[in-house]
Amino acid sequence: MSIFDLFDKIAKDKDPVGVKPVTWIVAGLGNPGKEYMLNRHNAGFMAVDYLSQKFGIAVRSAKFHAIVGDGMIGENRVLIMKPQTMMNNSGISIRDAAEFYKIPSSNIIIIYDDVNFDAGKLRIKRKGSDGGHNGIKSIIYHLNTDVFPRIKLGVGQKPHPDYDLAAWVLSDIPEPDRKEFFRAVEKCAEAVKLITEGNTEKAMQECN
């Protein structure tokens, strides 16, 4: 081994993540603040917390109006993030990170709550409208496209159509539903790995 090979090996051993560029962004949507921690609207934040533990990626740096961390998921270096802009302005954070790393929208995975499904249900889509979700509406606006993969976490349907939507999404996931919800969060991590490996179709088949 030459001296140059030795220096190269030392550099790689010191910073194994740094040898690859960030090629994916995974963002979970929610609202910052302890009072929102277990809200239905914070499903995305809870999913990112699980991803952080599952893949050993510390999410604690403040960048792009978000709390972020980057590391390896499989063979890909991924930025995972929790926008701190409040839900309705999530797109500002996603846009800034995407522009900095030059990430195409097709490589931006958004994880968020869906009130159309029972807790524990998971849905993966390659693209789509905002479906009335203000966080997704903001992302579509700031990215100027609706073509980005998204993972929807069911958080339970309103008890009746007239129930105030804001009150519903800002209420906590009830204790009886949490076991099924967190099972879906575990499946969400599997889906993220498959999607970043280029296996979106398989993720949809196995996790939907």
Image (spheres, rainbow, N blue to C red):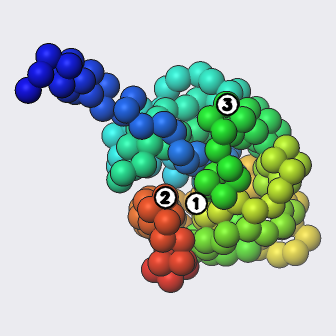
Task: Please tell me whether mark 2 sits on a helix, a strand or a loop.
Answer: helix
Percent across and percent down for residue 131 are 83, 67
Q: Is residue 131 above or below residue 142?
A: below
Residue 45 point in image, percent of width and height: 58, 45
Please say if the residues under marks 3 and 1 sit with CB atoms less than 8 Å apart: no
Q: Is residue 23 left or right of residue 168?
A: left
Mark 1: give few (<14), some (14-19) or many (20+) Cα within 10 Å: some
Query: What residue is at 75 percent from the left and 62 percent from the top?
Result: 147
Q: Nearer the viewer, residue 169 or 77?
A: 77
What amino acid does circle 3 point to? Phe
Q: Which residue is mark 3?
A: 100
Q: Are marks 3 and 2 in contact (CB under 8 Å)?
A: no
- For the question of whether residue 127 can be seen, the reply is yes
Q: Earlier in the sequence, mark 3 or mark 1?
A: 3
Q: Quadrant of the N terminus?
A: top left
Question: In the image, what residue occupies the spot 61% across and 64% down?
Answer: 151
Distance in Å between CA atoms under marks 3 and 2: 19 Å
| Element under disc 1 | loop
Q: Residue at x 35, y 53 (%)?
A: 74
The one of 198 and 53 positioned closer to us in this rendering: 198
Mark 2 or mark 1, earlier in chain? 1
Label 3: state its secondary structure: helix
* Residue named by callout 2: 196
Residue at the disc numbered 1: 174
Which tag, 3 or 2, sits closer to the chain's start? 3
Question: Is residue 33 visible to us here?
Answer: no
Q: Amino acid at mark 2?
A: Thr
